[in-house]
Structures are given as C-alpha cells and as structure tokens.
Amino acid sequence: YTGHMGFYHGSEQGPGGEEPGSWKEVFQIIFIVFRILAVPLALLLGAIIGLFALFWLFTIHALLGLGVILAIILALVARGVWEAKHPPELR
C-alpha cells in the first residue's frame, strides 16, 4: 500500500521529489510560531494578572487600589517629564 501520495505521484515522495516532512520540521514551525507570539501573549497575560491584582487590592481596602492607580499615574507622568527634559538626538 503506497497511500494517497503514491496514487498521485507514483511514490511516497512529494511533488518536487522531496521527502515528506519530519517531526523536526514540525517542531521548528511550532518554535517559530511560539517565538513570534511570546511577547504579545506575555503582555496580555501580564495585563490580566495586573487587573486581577488591582481588583484584589480593592477588596482588601479601597486605599490600596487607589494607591496603586496613583503610583501608575505618577510613574507615567515622571516618564513624560523625563522624556521632555531628554529629547532624542536627531542626526
């Protein structure tokens, strides 16, 4: 039994005479896809965990949740001020 490939091509080789894919190629493709998606998935997961932590802080005490929000706002303002004082060099 030569399978379906033998019916179309006369042997177990692919249409260009190449060998069929191996498990190494499958793992290479999976690795490439995971490498591409790693950063977006990490950011998404981090944002979800951060929101859960923020809600948890609000359940403990409202001032804890508000303190974290205030710290985030202050960090963003400090970053903006630092960027304004250190503009990028244009060459």
Image (spheres, grey):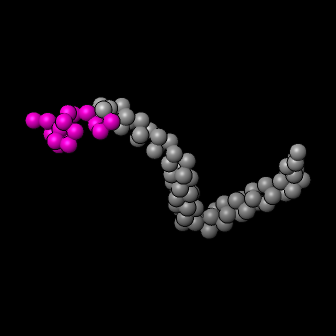
Is 8 placed above or below 80 here? above
4 part of magenta stretch: yes
Residue 24 location, x and y as percent? 36, 31
Residue 63 location, x and y as percent? 66, 66
Is 35 placed above or below 79 here? above
Front residue of 21 and 15? 15
Q: Quadrant of residue 60?
A: bottom right
The quadrant of the picture occupied by the N terminus is top left
Residue 83 is left or right of residue 73, and the answer is right
Question: Residues in magenta?
Answer: 1-16
Residue 26 is left or right of residue 41, and the answer is left
The answer, for residue 30, to whether it is visible in the render is yes
The quadrant of the picture occupied by the C terminus is top right
Residue 79 location, x and y as percent? 79, 55
Residue 86 is left or right of residue 65, and the answer is right
Residue located 56% across and 57% down the image: 47
Residue located 22% across and 39% down the image: 9
Is 37 placed above or below 27 here? below
The answer, for residue 67, to whether it is visible in the render is no
